[in-house]
């Protein structure tokens, strides 16, 4: 199988960690009979500062028509204080490619990584479906009398039946396909009486189509408490754009920090985008300190989306081997550089393949 992948290293440590991700994907391709054709694009702060370019429409058209997936590093640069380029590139891809599923698997690799006491990998193993194209992130709003004592700021949350329906269906379909028996939806319809009333009604309607799956509703504040108290009770969680953004960062901490967190921005059957979610970390950029495991594991998630489940599991197992051998970066208690962690994962891949 041959796949064409658009690579956007982005800013800061994005360039460092994505180089290791590409290197691991090339290694697993050689072991698995796959072929990746990587094409790099320099959309990021450097080009924005140099040319004023963020993400042209012809680039989006190119991604949509000619690539199987997009592999993104990280975006953000202190020289662009309002992060204008990052918003245009990341939200541009999410909205203009209609990547309505933000998929965030939360998998604990080792109990030593979890800040909760006595929690094992079997306790922290759930997947969050975050609606990715609506809610508060659409940019509908404005200011009145800005900069005065009478200033008014308005931010609108947009929730459509189509948008709510398709993300909830995606969560239930994922649960069915993976043999899960529970889907939890989190909203705040006791306070957000219109948009989240829609979420509540649509969830009940869709849940009735999946009698083998137990539906559960929690208000978002209760979900956050329950995730800390007993994460083992959750299998699949579906929620809105803003709430999903918050919940998935909590999930990242449960699995060992942002250096372990992966994500997919997906529209089934169309070109989708995959990114580690740790940010560009400009304070450590260029120092070979960044942990590339999130980028490497994001590559595995991309493989799974492309139907290469066996190769994806091979990468995940190899990454786990490097952690258990403490062949990791400093944030996980190791001493290896970013590049050395990538080399360790490749060595583990070869060992597993020859076992």
Image: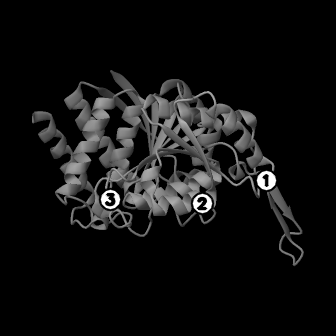
User: Disc 1 on helix, strand or loop?
Assistant: loop
**Mark found first going from the N terminus, 2 or 3:** 2
Callout in the foreground (2, 3): 2
Instruction: Read off the residue under disc 1.
Output: 156
| In the image, farthest residue toward the top | 1
> Nearest the camera: 322 or 43?
322
User: Do the residues bearing badges 1 and 2 touch, measured as CB atoms within 8 Å?
Assistant: no
Q: Is residue 333 left or right of residue 263?
A: left
For residue 120, which quarter of the picture?
bottom left
Instruction: Read off the residue under disc 3.
Output: 291
> Nearest the camera: 27 or 79?
27
Q: Residue 222 shows which numbered tag?
A: 2
> Nearest the camera: 60 or 268?
268
User: Disc 2 on helix, strand or loop?
Assistant: helix
| Residue 340 point in image, percent of width and height | 21, 55
| Residue 277 point in image, percent of width and height | 47, 53
* Relative vertical location of residue 268 with respect to residue 323 in this rendering, above or below: above
Q: Is residue 30 left or right of residue 206?
A: left
How far apart marks 1 and 2 lie (CA) works out to 24 Å
| Residue 38 point in image, percent of width and height | 37, 34
């Amino acid at each position: 199988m041959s796949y064409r992948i658009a690579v956007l290293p982005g800013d800061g440590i994005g360039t460092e960690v994505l180089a290791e991700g590409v290197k691991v994907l090339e290694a697993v391709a050689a072991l698995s009979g796959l072929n990746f054709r990587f094409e790099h694009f320099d959309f990021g702060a450097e080009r924005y500062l140099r040319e004023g370019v963020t993400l042209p429409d012809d680039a989006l058209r190119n991604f949509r028509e000619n690539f199987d997936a997009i592999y993104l590093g990280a975006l953000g640069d202190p020289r662009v204080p309002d992060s204008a380029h990052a918003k245009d590139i990341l939200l541009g891809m999410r909205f203009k490619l209609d990547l309505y599923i933000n998929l965030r698997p939360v998998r604990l690799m080792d109990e030593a990584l979890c800040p909760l006491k006595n929690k094992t990998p079997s306790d922290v193993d759930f997947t969050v479906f975050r609606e990715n194209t609506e809610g508060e992130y659409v940019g509908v709003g404005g200011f009145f009398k800005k900069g005065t004592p009478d200033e008014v700021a308005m931010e609108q949350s947009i929730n459509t039946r189509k948008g709510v329906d398709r993300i909830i269906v995606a969560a239930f379909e994922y649960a069915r396909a993976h043999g899960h028996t529970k889907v939890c939806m989190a909203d705040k319809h006791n306070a957000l009486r219109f948009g989240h009333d829609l979420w509540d009604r649509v969830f009940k309607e869709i849940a009735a189509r999946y009698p083998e799956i137990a539906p559960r509703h929690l208000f978002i504040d209760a979900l956050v408490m329950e995730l800390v108290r007993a994460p083992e009770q959750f299998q699949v969680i579906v929620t809105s754009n803003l709430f999903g953004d918050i919940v998935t960062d909590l999930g990242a901490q449960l699995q060992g920090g942002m250096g372990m967190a992966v994500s997919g921005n997906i529209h089934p059957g169309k070109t989708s985008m995959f990114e580690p979610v740790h940010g560009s970390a400009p304070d450590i950029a260029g120092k070979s300190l960044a942990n590339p495991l999130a980028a490497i594991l994001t590559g595995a998630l991309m493989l799974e989306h492309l139907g290469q489940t066996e190769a994806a599991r091979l990468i995940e197992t190899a990454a786990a081997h490097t952690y258990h051998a403490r062949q990791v970066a400093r944030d996980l208690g190791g001493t290896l550089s970013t590049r050395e962690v990538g080399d360790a994962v490749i060595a583990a891949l070869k060992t597993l393949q020859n076992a």
